[in-house]
Amino acid sequence: GGALAGALRAHLSARLPDYMVPSAFVRLAALPLTVNGKLDRNALPAPSDQAYALAAYQLPQGEVETALAQIWAAILGVERIGSNEYVFELGGYSLLAVQMLGRASNLGLSFSATDLFRAPVLKELASQICLQVQPSNSAVISVRPNGSQPPLFFVPSGFGDCSYVLGLAVEMDADCSVYALPWPPFDDVRPPTFEAMAAEVIVAIKQIQPRGPYRFAGYSSGAILAYAIAERLLSSDEVVSFMAFIDVSLPGASSNASLKNLAREFVLDRCGTLRDEYREVLERDTEQCSISELLEKAQQTGALAPDHDLHSDVSMYQRAAAFQRALQSYRIPSLPIEIYQFYASEPLSRWVPPDKQSGRDANLPKLGWDLVVDAGAIHAVPVPGNHATMVSNPENRQVLAHAISTALIGTLE
């Protein structure tokens, strides 16, 4: 029972980073599969008490441990977390790590994503944290704190998600600190413009780096906000020395269809490994269903877990839709900067709208940016995978991280 689980855990811990070591071990005759031959997660048996490695609950000690335990318990939806528990065992992963860093920063707990991945046991992390008297209000996430070169600022994706930055930064070998920038809070009364968002994000950037040269990177449509930030900095005589686009197409003409596509993409994104099973249902329902109904149907079909927080998803989608509308009204200027375009070498699957698909194929590898930037200033670098898997697949992500690092080093020479 627990002793065997403990022995297996110890064996794997010697070979894998802590966050990859399972918390429970269940013996199965065979993995349950769906009709499509994929793993049927809903048919997996729930682990019994004996499946877990035995570790006695230890009450968190001191102010920092207690605060961390409360934050993790709230994010993971569990009653209590002991000071000797591995937070990644309990279900923590990149997106949750971002939430953890944000909440901790608001309480004045200062640490980086690197610290979190290196010390996933609560009391180990607590021992490395300094408690600041003044809570930080910039909401900028320190992904990697140290480096001798100017920092690299990543802009969140079009869904406001910067969890993609954590995995990339771990693999990057450039000698610079790395930060994930926030989306500014959206005001429901006044829809945001890209210009206003850029101005607000620059305030947070300047708290960390008061003067240029500035270096930016962004994934998908989030990178266009990085471009708007660069536009504003250049207009005030600052230097932008590096701009990395991770598979960023120049936005086409706006249409109502693009918000429907956004809804479909958003829900599929939530379904993770079960996206293929749910895609056909979604194709049928996108036209007439609201985002709440689409998410509820995904939950009913088993593509989302029964305890999935639909409410926070809906508010995240509404922010993503506001971002999309701001993007559609942004007039993209021609800027005198060089762009590294790290483009996905495989097209996305068939549900991408035909207009985007054909435009994209005809236009690889610059993805349309040679219409606004001098073609000679665009350095196109292919990365294995499609728009999603170039970042989500560990092998592809390693290639991408290495390519970004090489480009960063090249701009310094």
Image: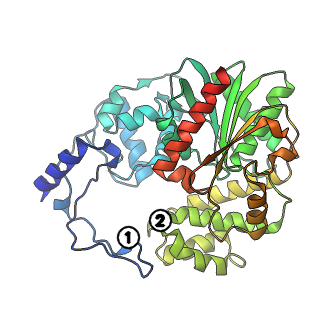
Residue 363: x %, y % from top left: 78, 55
- Image quarter in which the N terminus is found: bottom left
Separation of marks 1 and 2 at Cα, in angstroms: 9 Å
Q: Residue at x 62, y 76 (%)?
A: 282
Vertical side of 39 occupied by 399: above or below: above
CB under 8 Å between discs 1 and 2: yes
- Image quarter in which the C terminus is found: top right
Looking at the rendered structure, the number of numbered marks drawn on it comes to 2
Instruction: List the residue tagged with mark 2.
Output: 273
In-front residue for pair 282/363: 363
Q: Tag 2, which secondary structure?
A: helix
Question: Is residue 242 shown to the viewer in this render?
Answer: yes
Q: Residue at x 50, y 73 (%)?
A: 299
Q: Which corner quadrant of the image does residue 149 belong to?
A: top right
Residue 301's disc number = none
Q: Tag 1, which secondary structure?
A: helix
In-front residue for pair 49/256: 256
Of the two numbered discs 1 and 2 on the same chain, state the one appearing first in sequence: 1
Q: Residue at x 30, y 33 (%)?
A: 123
Q: Which corner quadrant of the image does residue 246 belong to?
A: top right
Question: Is residue 138 shown to the viewer in this render?
Answer: no
Residue 41's disc number = 1
Q: Residue at x 58, y 66 (%)?
A: 268
